[in-house]
Amino acid sequence: MNDDITAEDDGQSGIKKLPLAAAVVALIGLVDAVYLTVKHLRNEVVPCSLVEGCEKVLSSAYAEIGGIPIAAFGAVAYFLAFSLAVLAAYGNRLTWTLFRVQAALMAAYTLWLLYLQAFVIGAFCQFCLISAATSLTLFIFALFVKIR
Amino acid sequence: MAKEKKSQSGMPLALIVIVLLVVVISGVWLYNSSSTTTTPAANQANQAKPTAVNIPPGASLGVNMIGSPDAAVTIEEFADYQCGACASVHPVLKELQGVYAGNKNFRFVFRHYPLGIAGHDKSFEASVATEAAGLQGKFWQMQDKLFTNQQAWTSNPNYRQMWVEYAGAVGMDVERFKTDIAGIQTKERVEQDMQRGRAMAISSTPTVLINGNPVPFNQLNITTLRQLVDAEIQKATAAKAASDTVAQPASNANSGSASNSASNSNAASNAK
């Protein structure tokens, strides 16, 4: 791929900025996923609102796999992505390759979740959409950023 | 270069460990924190201006009412039959109605507020069904059926047949129930409530108001509601006692501190 962007060292510190930015995005996804996990585990009922709907997404059958909230899997995945990206920012090429593979898998799963919300559940949940945005952003990093 | 890399190798690991610790600790803290954290909708309810119970247009008070028509304390609920939170609050409000049954200072008014959002395709029709039940004096029984069986009918394509079964179970004339659902009268009743809700800028369900003051969603438990109702009853009886002792309302110089209900009862005594 000729249009790949190569992550350059920041002259003095030796830290690569683009993987570091990816790590920050993963961190946002991590915080969001932890929030969703806690919210799911506390099983809070929220009022239905004209603007936000009923948060029925979080209480749907799709919100759990084997009794474990998928948000928890999301939290683990984002933590892993964060760790890989941080290591890559400090020059580890192997972790960046792993990051790229993981980001692709996460993006695929995100598309599935978006499909479920749009066509099966018929409702969206705000914090799930934030997670979708962060994971797709990670995928963009994975697609275009290379480390030399 | 190699030397420089080595000196930094601890940094990323330290970052990762710190993030892990922070996330775990804050997650546990969030999980254990009390549920007083208000939801966005509850915040909206908090910010909503107190609205006098009788001002907005729409349905006349008392179509779906439990209690005394001239009670000092009015609980008004706006709800949607497909709203899970409304179903979860339903037993609490039912208990509240039981606690104050026969109390001449208490009345409970139900308002239909089908939201018309995704997944609420049957709420308007459900409201119409309870109105049809109301024409046979079974409004509250039908409402109870719809809320307690919400999960069952909300996703069932044969929900109409289920409602007919509920109607039969609470002892209604089923044929008349079917006709009334199809009629215009029941739909108009629901629309009147919706009009009132819109005029009051109700944006979420359930919205419960005590004498026009919205109660935040997370306070909709029996203990808090009883406290709030008792306080309002006390306020009203105190105000009534005050207006009884002051023979001439015109001499009531301390009206600046009078509460809403106090001024209402003053207005009533002025009208006499």
Image: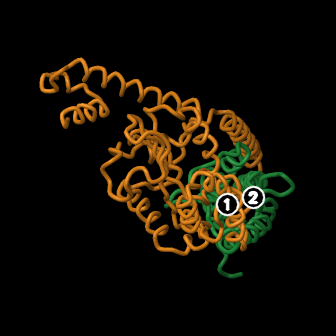
Chain colours: A green, B orange
Residue B51 higher or lower than B58, as above or below: above
Q: What's under tag 2, amino acid-wise? A: Ala
Helix, strand or loop for disc 2: helix
Farthest right residue in view: A66
Residue B19 falls left or right of residue B75 = right
Which residue sits at x=33%, y=48%? Answer: B54
Farthest left residue in view: B250
What's the CA distance linking mark 1 and mark 2? 7 Å
Point out the tag, 1 or 2, that comes first from the N-terminus: 1
Residue B259 occupies quadrant: top left
Q: What's under tag 1, amino acid-wise? A: Val
Instruction: Report in which chain the residue with disc 2 lies.
Output: A
For the question of whether residue B257 can be seen, the reply is: yes
**x%, y% of residue A98?**
81, 63
Residue B64 higher or lower than B226, as above or below: below
Asked if both marks, 1 and 2, belong to the same chain, the answer given is: yes
**x%, y% of residue B87?**
63, 51
Residue B145 occupies quadrant: bottom right
Which residue in the protein does label 1 denote?
A: A57
Farthest top residue in view: B245
Which residue in the protein does label 2 denote?
A: A63
Residue B241 falls left or right of residue B89 = left
Give the number of the disc on residue B272: none
- Asked if labels 2 and 1 touch by Cβ distance under 8 angstroms, the answer is yes
Which residue sits at x=43%, y=32%? Answer: B105
Instruction: Report in which chain the residue with disc 1 lies.
Output: A
Residue A39 higher or lower than B103, as above or below: below
Helix, strand or loop for disc 1: loop
Viewer-nearest residue: B180 or B114:
B180
Which residue sits at x=61%, y=65%? Answer: A124
